[in-house]
Image (spheres, coloured by chain):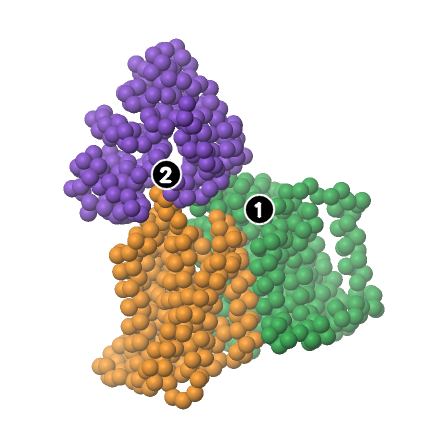
Amino acid sequence: MSSPLLEVTDLHVRIGGSHILQGVGFTVAKGGVTALLGRNGVGKTTTIKAVMGLVRSTGTITLDGAAIGGARTFAIVRRGVGYVPEDREVFAGLTVGENLRLARLDGADRWDLVFDLFPELKKRLGQQAGTLSGGQQQMVSLARVLLNDHRLLLVDEPTKGLAPKVVGEVADALARAAEIATLVLVEQDLKVVRRLAGDAVVLDHGQVVHTGDAAALLADEELTRRLLGVGMSEGAA
Amino acid sequence: MTQSQPKKAALGPAALGAIALAVAAVLPLIPVGVKGIMPGPFSTAGTLQLLAVCLVFGALALTYDLVFGRAGLLSFGHALFFATGVYACNIAIVHAGLPFVPAVLVTLVVGAAVAALVGALSLRVKGIAFAMVTLAFAQAASVLVLLNPGHYTGGEEGLGLDATAIPRAFVGVVNTRNLYWLALALLVLVYAIVRWTARSEPGRAAEALRENEQRATVLGIASFPVRLLLFTVAGTLATLCGIVYLLAIGSSTHQVTDSHFSLTVLVMVVLGGLGSRWGVVVGGVLYHFLDDRLSALATTAFVQDLPAVLRAPLSQPLFLLGVIFIVVVLFLPGGIAGAFGHRTHQAAAIEGLLGRFRRAPKPG
Amino acid sequence: MSTVILLAVTGLALGALYFLIAAGISLAFGLMHVLNFAHGAFLTIGAYAGYLVASGGGDVGTGRFVLMLAAGTLAGALAAVVTELLLIRPLYGNTHAQLLVTVGLSLALVALIEELAGSDARGYHSPGWANATTEIAGSAIRGSRFLAIGVAVLVLAALVVFLRRTRYGLIIRAGVENRSMVTALGIDVRRAFTLVFALGGAAAGLGGVIAGSYFGQVEPRVGTGLFIYALIVIVIGGLGSLTGTAVAAVLVGLLQQFLNYYAAGVGDLSVLALLALVLLARPAGLFRSTAS
């Protein structure tokens, strides 16, 4: 076994008096997609934000063996971690082109890949990102990280609120992304999880309650219902 | 931080307060002074006037703490209400010919109205924009006073107080000790009202809003009326402080309308320790005392022996106070009260303001 | 008619001064929510730096005046960078303490300048053309008015080009909108902020020399006096919006100048009335900031 790409140990986050993460620990192996699952409000987004240094946390976080806990967000990104936030967070007042140029770090040049994945964006480079549809904004958000040579991508609910057809396109893009980087994916749509994820980490009440093979988890209707509150059949709209 | 528990004193805070009050009350009867620090023995008029103004500023700092410390509203316009007291009362006596007591009552009504109006307008914006707006409105007083419409304010020269119109007990050098006691009574009164207000329903609601506006709003607290009420109560009390200041100084001068004065009220409170009632009183008293005495200190041998590069800035009290203030903010965020292990709201207030600008991460 | 033109040009020039000081405050606030109370003092520092260059001896010609402008700009930028590194940066993330620390700095700086330069106003040296008047439609207008307007327009244009055409400009525009997402793209926003602060300080310092030639004198509180009106301009224009700041600066300058013509102080009060109106009708300012 090679050392894991991301290792999180005993992660705690407290925000405004609430103890949101209570000792989260998991590892993410190099390559493939690890799904971070759980009901609403169990701490998935907070876990991602803690890894990114966007919320204050205690515990250890290592990337390829080197500690990144406590580092500033921009420095964590510079070490090869890309972040696709929940709700996309594109810069509405900037154009699509400006959003992408802003995100492109020194030396990175994956314009071909990005435009191959999202030909739509190439046509809309001059358009204000705020006027794009939700699906197009998600493409911008994904394209921003795919432009760079990141080792690890943290992708938070990329299909949330998207039309079924667009969900498919986003999933295709994530599949391509998984070929060039390791993915940690927070996702409610279990069909997408089943298609992409190798491993699964399930959170509940700020703690990890299950880790293992994603397909095996989803195959167990009873376990899925207990851990995620939904079954495979109703989980995918 | 300032979270450490207060040290167990041999005497409770109430007993310490009573002792401090008793000492303050008998001070004018003591014919000795502290050489080099006091301008003269405690019983002399000069010292008593200085101390009276110190006490007024202690009271003013208390009223400001209600706005900033309790409600978490960073107002830069609090001096406006103080200036309203200083000017409106004098104008009511000199120009409207009102007797003293009706003039005081009219002034308090005017002060409350001005505070309610400024509060209602300024509370439409939050956080640092609120600070900007309140500072701007405080500027109105400065403009009005210097504009001197109808020669009501006396402009640059100021407006002298008509000694015949105010109670005999507060007129003349021999009665300075009465002024001192009046200032002490003001401080006690303001302390009682501020304490009562802070513990009242609206006071606690304002505190809840400061701690976590979202949570408080969910609990059904309407932020605007609660904040406006505290702002108005504090403004009216500041007007009362202004009236006593007018009696102590004997005239209305435009310095109290200056934007610098607005800032110094803030300095007093932060210096003393935001959210600690005794702390801010000490801050207000100490601020004026230092402001007054630093120029005297600058003539001491210690400062005189310094090279000119160091001596020059040291002879400007505001320079020293500004630097002290910076040092306190950087290294002693709990102020004087915090340094004595008293738990202050400084840290909480800072977090509270921060929360408005940072999007709180949602668990999910 | 001639009075109207005179008041309009003078008002525009006053607006130009407000813009020079407000632009930096607005950008710094937009990006980091830092309100720098010492910004007015930066203008004063710039004004005195120019004064020192002018008092080197002899008449002030255009060449010397350009040196004065450069000295003011440099002094303002330097003061801003030192302030940012020593006082603002250690309190990063604590906007409240950052504001307080600049309040203390503002008090201390004004007192220091009063001690060093005296609290009385001093005559300000400008080249002959700045004091000479030009006849426009019957009204005699001093050169310093056109100078102020011209410099402010140039600064505005330079800032717009900087924000639109450079990578740092892109970072700043994105940061005003959503700072944490910019850092999450691997960009050190603090470096961009230091630059913003320096640029704001430079504009204020330049404004100091312009203010000196506009008023014909300099005194230790010139910057803090203008600062309050700059804040009004920023709130009216919309926090963090450069366009809003520019438009509001012109609006406030004109309003103040025209109404002060009837009685000194009426214009100042009407500006406050305008602020009250804006707060009632559009609390976010005339030009909504994308940051909010």
Query: Which hue is chain B drawn in?
Result: green
**Looking at the figure, which quarter contains the C terminus of chain B?**
top left
| Residue where numbered disc 1 is placed | B347
Viewer-nearest residue: B253 or B322: B322
Q: Give neighbour class at mark 2: few <14, some 14-19, many 20+ (Cα, 10 Å).
A: some
Residue A29 place in picture, x, y as percent: 39, 26
Q: Residue at x 18, y 35 (%)?
A: A116
Q: Which mark is residue A80?
A: 2
Query: Can residue B190 be seen here?
Result: no
Marks 2 and 1: CB-CB under 8 Å? no
- Furthest toward the left, the residue is A123
The amino acid at mark 1 is Ala
Lateral position of residue A134 relative to residue B65, left or right: left
Q: Chain of mark 2?
A: A
Q: Is residue B106 above or below residue A38?
A: below
Q: Which chain is orange?
A: C
Q: Between marks 2 and 1, how big is the CA–CA gap? A: 35 Å
Query: Which hue is chain A drawn in?
Result: purple
Helix, strand, or loop for circle 1? helix
